[in-house]
Image: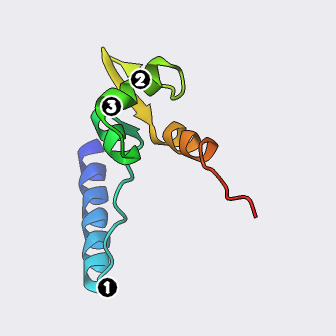
Amino acid sequence: MANAQSDFIEQIAQRVVEKFEKLGISPAPVQKRLYTVAQAAIYIGRTPAATQHLIASGKISTVRADDRVFLDVRDIDKWIEANKCHPVR
């Protein structure tokens, strides 16, 4: 029974994909949320060492999982906004 349901759902999904393709609509790309230090460095225009310094000084938070270090793009964007200089008029 579960296999029949799975096959039915797969057929529906395939038809939806075909309809989208026929209409020229492609799915939106998945936006990445977590960046490695090297990727975050590119995102903010700094070297990986300078990005590590921002992390070590507590200016940007990290997400640690399985001995890996990531930076949340939302935290990076907050850091960018907090460090914007607005011209005095």
For label 1, the SS is helix
- Residue 41 lies, in percent from the top left, at 34, 39
Q: Amino acid at mark 1?
A: Leu
Tell me the kind of residue under disc 3: Val
Q: Residue at x 67, y 55 (%)?
A: 86
Q: Earlier in the sequence, mark 2 or mark 1?
A: 1
Front-most of 35 and 86? 86
- Is 66 located above or below residue 81 in the figure? above
Q: Residue furthest front?
A: 89
Where is residue 47? Give x, y as percent: 31, 36
Q: CA distance from mark 2 to mark 1?
A: 48 Å
Q: Amino acid at mark 2?
A: His
Instruction: Decide which of 1, 71 is in the foreground and name it.
Output: 71
Q: Secondary structure at mark 2?
A: helix
Please name the residue that numbered disc 1 is placed on: 23
Mark 3 to mark 1 CA distance (whole Å): 39 Å
Q: Is residue 88 left or right of residue 76?
A: right
Judge from the rendering whether residue 71 lies leftward or rightward of residue 19; answer left or right. right
Q: Residue at left 28%, top 70%? A: 17
Q: Which one is in front in this view, the residue at disc 3 or the one at disc 1? A: 3
Q: Nearer the viewer, mark 2 or mark 1?
A: 2
Q: Classify mark 2: residues with Cα within 10 Å, few (<14), some (14-19) or many (20+).
A: few
Q: Quadrant of the C terminus?
A: bottom right
Name the residue tied to disc 2. Answer: 53
Which residue position is annotated with label 3?
A: 37
Up-down relation of residue 21 to residue 65 (above or below): below
CA neighbours of label 3 inside 10 A, class few (<14), some (14 to 19), many (20+): many
Question: Gap in Å between the C-alphas at discs 2 and 3?
Answer: 11 Å
In primary-sequence order, the first of circles 3 and 1 is 1
Circle 1 crowding by C-alpha within 10 Å: few under 14, some 14–19, many from 20: few
Where in the figure is residue 77, as x and y percent of width and height? Answer: 53, 45
